[in-house]
Image (tube, rainbow, N blue to C red):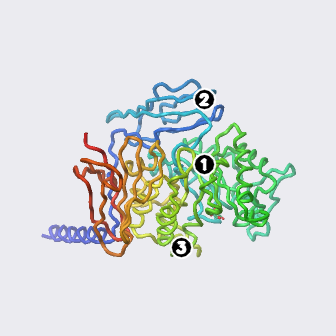
Amino acid sequence: MKSRSILFILVVLMATFQAFTQESGRVILTPKPGPEPRIHGARIFGVRPGSPFLFTIPATGTRPMKYEAVDLPAGLSINSDNGQITGSLAKKGAYRVTFRVTNAYGKAERDFRIVCGDTIALTPHMGWNSWYVWENHVTEKIMKDAADAMVSTGLADHGFMYVNIDDCWAMKAGSKDSLLIGPGRDSLGRINSNGRFPDMKGLTAYIHAKGLKAGIYTSPGPTTCAGHTGSYMHEASDVKRFIEWGFDFLKYDWCSYGNYAKDTTLAEYEKPYILMGHILKKQRRDIVLNLCQYGMADVWNWGREVGGNSWRTAGDLGGSFDDIGKALFRDGFDLYAQRNLQRYCGPGAWNDPDYLLIGNLSNWKGQIVPTPLTPDEQYTQVSLWCLLAAPLILSGDITRLDEFTLSLLTNNEVLDVDQDPLGKGGYRISKTGDLEVWAKPMEDGSWAVGLFNRGETRANVSLHWNDLKIKGRQKVRDLWRQKDLGVFEQSFSSEVRPHGVIMVRLCKEL
Ligand code: GAL
């Protein structure tokens, strides 16, 4: 009798919990990966001739797994225990490779293209950045823990690759923290890291050993936004230093450069980025260049030309903690639709609406707290970013990801939209009041579509084939749930929660 009443209480509690999570929208839709191997992430990877190559095959499945890459071009080899492909390619060329991953439960195969040429970042960057959780407290230990977490959480198995230090690794004149005080540069003019980063080379080696890549940050001005040493007049020697240290990614943040630009002409806005673009092009190491100047002078018009692989399109999405939700709609939806930003991105060069602000973030008052975005807004951010072909850089605490947050970052069918090799940016195809439909053409001829509800009450959102200029019977698949919804003609409608989304893919019925 006693155990039956305990069981009853448990059932009631579980039902209440379920009802509560459903009401709040904190519902996990992403199906859990099975024990059998599955290969994920980008299907194409760019490298320049002579640059060190590192790409790790992202795959889920029970370990141990055996990795193979069939038809790997000369110069590259694979570690069959961990899927890391390393080496370098001497000549330009495009290579078709087959990845194969095997474990006790089965085998997975996937076609992959390696393109050795002038262009890197053929799909949007995926990774983690320290800023929105650790801001000016970042340390070497935090970065190592982040690399560990990228692997242990399984994010690396879904294609997350870059572990990026933001501001605050260099010296800071006048700081109260003794670890930050010291000469900004050594006697040879080489930039110094501060006492929180005693061994940069060791740090990148640690990150690379996990099959991941390392990112660093600096400013074209003499100081960074947080007042640390910047690269003004030392651009080439700083790049040399970053390469000696082993970095693969550079965020170049305008900051104090504003005091050095002569005027507000386009030429002055472009100048520091042209300089950095030239320097990086000459190196025998591929460094992804992320321009961070908040969208000034319509950077999307010239970001690619100056050598940028991505450019921030607006100010800081999380600059005001309480307004992240508002910023998401303003700097995501509105800016991209008004300026038709899809016209500017493509393989090698991406619009960057800033980081994924999910999980735990700094509230800029000395605490790390859960994101203020509602669960629906979190689905909305990830869906929109994938439709825009935006870099997917998490900036919440990667070492404390709950199951819900992790589920938002590990849905392969959603991530495939972002990483599609065609590299088209999505755009708004219809807007009826608060209801918006966004669509992205995919390489296989299908369409990825987001049905968004920016309003405060549940509403029905409709997608009409006419708006996509397509005809006939279309198979519709719900990407978050990874479920086929049926075959539709002319239109598809679904109820969408307030500030929420339904994300689907449309394939012509053959
Ligand atoms: C801002 C930049 C942020 C962050 C910060 C560091 O200018 O937009 O992403 O890097 O500086 O101080």
Residue bearing the label numbered 2: 92
- Lower sequence index among marks 3 and 1: 1
Answer left or right for 505 relative to 181. Answer: left
Q: Which residue sits at x=59%, y=59%?
A: 312
**Quarter of the picture holding the C terminus:** top left
Cα distance, mark 1 to mark 2? 19 Å
- Badge 2 amino acid: Lys
Q: Which residue sits at x=39%, y=56%?
A: 407
Residue bearing the label numbered 3: 321
Would you say residue 30 is visible in this rendering? no
Quick one: 240 or 18, which is closer to the camera? 240
Q: Residue furthest left?
A: 1
Residue 493, quarter of picture? bottom left
Q: Which residue sits at x=48%, y=72%?
A: 326
* Crowd rating for badge 1 (residues with CA inside 10 Å; few <14, some 14–19, many 20+): many
Quick one: 56 or 265, which is closer to the camera? 265
Would you say residue 48 is visible in this rendering? yes
Helix, strand or loop at label 3? It is helix
Q: Position of residue 430 (x, y in %)?
A: 38, 62
Cα distance, mark 3 to mark 1? 28 Å
Quick one: 218 or 245, which is closer to the camera? 218
Residue bearing the label numbered 1: 309
* Crowd rating for badge 3 (residues with CA inside 10 Å; few <14, some 14–19, many 20+): some
- Badge 1 amino acid: Asn
Q: Establish if 233 lies above or below 228.
A: above
Q: Position of residue 465 (x, y in %)?
A: 30, 54
